[in-house]
Amino acid sequence: MSGAPRIAIVGGGLGGLTLARVLHVHGIASTVYELDASATARDQGGSLDLDPESGQRALLHAGLLEEFRPLSRPEDGELRLLDKDAAVGFRSPAPEPGERDEGKERPEIDRRALRDLLLGSLPEGTVRWGHKVRAVALGVAGRPTLTLSDGRTVETDLLVGADGAWSRVRPLVSDADPVYSGVSYVDCLLHDVDARHPAVAELVGRGTMFALADEKGLIAQRNGGDRIRVYAAAKAPEEWSRSGLIDPADPVAARKRLLDLFPDWDEGLRALIADSDGPLVPRPIHALPIGHRWDRTPGVTLVGDAAHLMSPFAGAGANLAMLDGAELALALTTHNDLETALNAYETPMFPRAEEAAAQSADNLTGFFRPDGLRIACDTFTAVTSGSGGEAR
């Protein structure tokens, strides 16, 4: 791109940071406005598996793929599907070291480790911590303008909304709002699992475990640092997670209420909740409409959840956010005109996101049916066909 456009990225998650990094690789500066006070201000969530065609490709363009490999955990790629009696309905083991094909592998990595990798690759001052965006607007000259919480205004040539589900940038291009999916999570952690919770560690295995029954689920995944993150999921009214029934400030009462949702489930599965450490955090699952897109709006675009928020049941959200960031940066480096570059980015992004969002919605609906375990087994058997999956 000719000249040096002023680029403002709102949101310092994986999509926004990937965009900033790939721009930096190509000699283009940007500024990331992040409301968190620091990189450690809040929990970054659990692990994710990085897909070769999206997340890993983004890291390749960012020049970070080789640095990513020692931080990842291919050995935590196992998948188990259980019923509420803890009987295994499906198992796909992690690849053995000698069997790994780096062209197909989806190694696990903690979100914090991946974010720290991206943060460490950016010039000092790129991320402006503690900069909450209060408002965005198109100025009289058509240039996007940010108003920060301290009252300062910033005019820019390109404004990128990488600010997640409740994006402040999205209203400039779209009137769509996220809609509650009908399913809520409550998440919690178990620490030092191999020493303190060996039975839970054995039940979950080296990777991710889904236990599905009664239109509910207990989902557990290995994280780094000998931890297991647990997501208790259930169909519930949207108000359920905000009504005080699951109060993070009262973890004892919250655990009891959550366990009451799984009264006749195997005690080993119930231990995922009963033995967890710290607070239980309710997380209602929202999604933007499938096929969400917008007309080309001069000087503004979106990446990641701001563009295509979906449920986690396609394993695509973080991967697509990183690919969005990388492909937007590449479009900006290969086209001299800003609007041409934005059109080149958005045109393939829309159908790609629509496909993943449809799959995510189908999986959420299917997994939380009364026969959800059967549907999940069929889904993952199809995905892993020919790669060692075992289905009951």
Image (tube, rainbow, N blue to C red):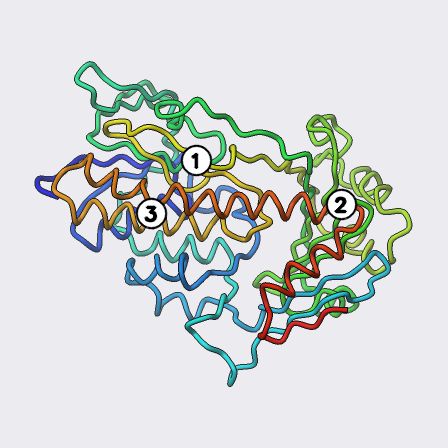
Q: Nearer the viewer, residue 284 or 12?
A: 284
Which of the two labelled residues, at mark 1 and mark 2, occupies the earlier sequence position?
1
Under tag 1, what secondary structure? helix
Determine the image quadrant of residue 391. bottom right
Q: Badge 2 is on which residue?
A: 369
Indicate left or right for 175 with 79 as reference: left
Distance between the alpha carbons at the discs numbered 1 and 2: 28 Å
Quadrant housing the N terminus? top left
Image spot of residue 229 (x, y percent): 65, 54
Residue at figure coordinates x 63%, y 35% from the top left: 181
User: The disc labelled 1 sits on which kind of residue?
Assistant: Ala
Quadrant housing the C terminus? bottom right
Question: Residue 364, relative to residue 301: is it above or below?
Answer: below
Which of the two labelled residues, at mark 3 and mark 1, occupies the earlier sequence position?
1
Image spot of residue 113 (x, y percent): 46, 58
Q: Badge 1 is on which residue?
A: 306
User: The disc labelled 2 sits on which kind of residue?
Assistant: Arg
Indicate left or right for 303 with 196 as reference: left
